[in-house]
Amino acid sequence: MYTTEYIGKKPEKFVSLDWIDIDDLKSFLGAQAHPTPATVNIPLPASPLPNPYGAPMVEEGRASVMDRENLNALSVDFQVIRSLLPPSPTSHDASSMAVASDDEMTDSELDNNDPEAGWVPSDTKWLDRNLTSDSWTNTHKVMAKLTVERIERLTGIPSIWPVPEKLTAFLIDRTKLMESGEELKDGDGNLRTIDALIKNKDQDSWASNTGKGDTSPMVVYTPGGKPIESRRARLDCKVQGGFACRNVNPVLMEGERRGMSTESRDAIRRAQGHDRQNAGSSAEALAIESPGHPDATYAVVCTHAGTKKDHMYFALPSEIDPKIFARVFARCTVSAEDIPSCATIVSPSTGRKGKCRYPHIIDGQTHEYKIKQYKCKAKRTIYLPKDPSIRLALVYNHAEHAHSHPMPVFRKLDYETKAVFKGCIKAFGVVGATVPKVDLGKLFFSASTKLKLNGLTPGKFSTALNSNTTKRKIIRETKLEEFPDGVDLKGASRLFHDDQLKSINEKYYHRLIRTVHGKFFMVGAFKDLLEIANDAGVKSVA
C-alpha cells in the first residue's frame, strides 16, 4: 500500500497502470472485495417493450450467459482489469436493453460528440512564424449584447491583428499549455495575464486598461461552452494613433488598414530610405556597390581645369542630387516639385516626435515642420475570465473602425524574444558577452546563438534584434541579474565569499590574492583537478 504522502511526492509514478502488481492486486481483491456471482439470469418479457428512442430492439428469448467453467477459463489479467473498471451506470427498472447500430447514427449526432466538429482551417495569413488558426463560421453569441459571425481560434499570439469587416472574435486558448517559461512570468514570479501578453506582443500602440473596475459580463468563449464571469480590457488606438510630419505625403496616411498586407508599410520604408539617402544620414547610401574607387559621375570644375593642374576640381558626393545642385549652382529657384515629398512617419513607441529632419522646400525656401499626431479610431475589447487559472481570452476588434495609419515596422521587443536572446547570452557566457560575440555574422561566430535561434540570425529571428542598442540593453540586464554587484572587483569579491560557504567538494574559488602592486586575482579550480595535479605521477610540461 502506498501512503498519501508518498503519492504526493512522486505523482509521476501513478500516471499509468505500470505500478500495479497483478499478483498483489489479485490477493487484495480476494481478501477485501465482496464475492460476486459468476452468472446472472435476466428474465425477459415475451413481447418487446415500447422503445422511446426509436432505435431497433435486440430481441432474444433469453439472455446468453457464460457458465462458470468458461468464466474461470478467462485470463487472470482480464479479471483484474475488469475489476479496476468503474461499474456501468444502472438504469431504473430496466428489463431490456436498446442498442442502436452505428450505421443509423446521423452526422449531427456524431458531430455533437466531437469537440472539433465545425472548426475548419482558416484562410487568414498571419505575419508571425508558425502561427495558424482555425475558424468557426457559424454565428456565436459571446454575451448578451455581442453576437459575432465568425470565430478564429489561434495557435499563438500574433504581432499584428486584422480588423475584419465581418464581426469576428479571436480566441486565444492556453488552457492545455505548460506555461513555465521565463517570458510568461513577471518580476515577482507570477504568471502574466493573457491580456498582458497580447498587449506586449502587439506592434500597434494602444491606450488600455485591465477592466478590473468595469462590469463583469458573462462571456461564452467557445461554441457550446458555458458562460464564465469575465472582465473586459478596453483598448483605444485614437490616443496613440500615428505620428508623422505635418507636410508628409498625404497618400501615405490616407485610407484604412483592416488586413495584414505589408504593401503600405513597405512603400513607406522605400520612401523613407530615399529620404535618408538624399539627406546623407543613412550608412546604406554611403556604401560602394562596386569594388575599388570608380570615378564620380558629376563634378565641379574650373573652365580651365584641363590646361593647368592647380585649377579647382571636386566630385559631387553620392548623396547630392546633381539636377538640384545644378539649379542651385545656376542660381535658379528650387520648388517643391523638384524634390520627393516627405515620408517622415514616426512610431508611437519611439522618440523623435519634435521636428521633422527632412528639408522641406516651399517657394524656393527651406521650411521646418513639426511632427503631428494623427488620430486613429480603432477600438478593441479583450474578454478574460476573472478566474486567472482559466487561461482563455477572446479578442474583439470593433469592425466599425479600422486603423487609419499604416502598419508599423516590427521594432517592439516582446517578452518571448527577450527571453530567447537572454538564453543565447547565458549559453555563450554572461561575463564575456558582448553584442558582436553573441550575435551571428559578426567577428565572433557564436554556435550557441545559432542553436538557440534555430539557425537564424537574431535580426531574422525578430526584427527587434536588428537594433544593437536593444541587444546591448538585454546583455546589461542579464549581467545584472547574474551578478548584482557587477563583474568588476566588487562582484568578484562577492562571488568568492559566497563560494566559501560551500563544502570543500563543491568549492571552486580557493584564494583571493592581492599583489604588492594593488592588483587582485582569484585562484579557482575543481577539487578533482587539484588532486590530479598533486599526484606524484603527473609531470608538468614546459
Image (cartoon, rainbow, N blue to C red):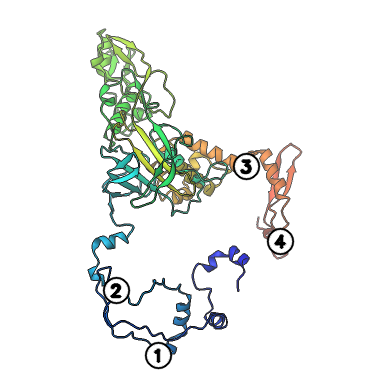
Residue 411: percent from left, percent from top? 40, 35
Q: Earlier in the sequence, mark 1 or mark 2?
A: 1
Q: Residues within 10 Å of mark 1 (few under 14, many from 20)?
A: few
The residue furthest right is 516
Mark on residue 531?
Answer: 4
Q: Position of residue 253 (x, y in %)?
A: 29, 25
Q: Which residue is mark 1?
A: 67
For label 2, the SS is loop
Distance from label 4 to label 2 (Cα)? 78 Å
The amino acid type, in three-letter code, at marker 2 is Val
Label 3 with label 4: CB-CB less than 8 Å:
no
Q: Mark 3 vs mark 2: which is more N-terminal?
A: 2
CB within 8 Å, label 3 to label 1: no
State whether residue 403 is above or below residue 364. Answer: below
Q: Residue at x 35, y 83 (%)?
A: 43
Measure the C-alpha gap from mark 1 to mark 4: 76 Å
Q: Earlier in the sequence, mark 3 or mark 1?
A: 1
Q: Is the Cβ of the residue at disc 3 closer than 8 Å to that at disc 2?
A: no
Quarter of the image where one finds residue 442: top left
Residue 408 visible: no
What residue does disc 3 label?
483
Label 1 element class: loop
Q: Secondary structure at mark 3?
A: loop
Q: Which-is-in-front pick, marks 3 and 4? A: 3
Q: Position of residue 542 (x, y in %)?
A: 65, 55
Is 44 positioned to the left or the right of 39 in the image? left
Q: Which mark, residue 99?
A: 2
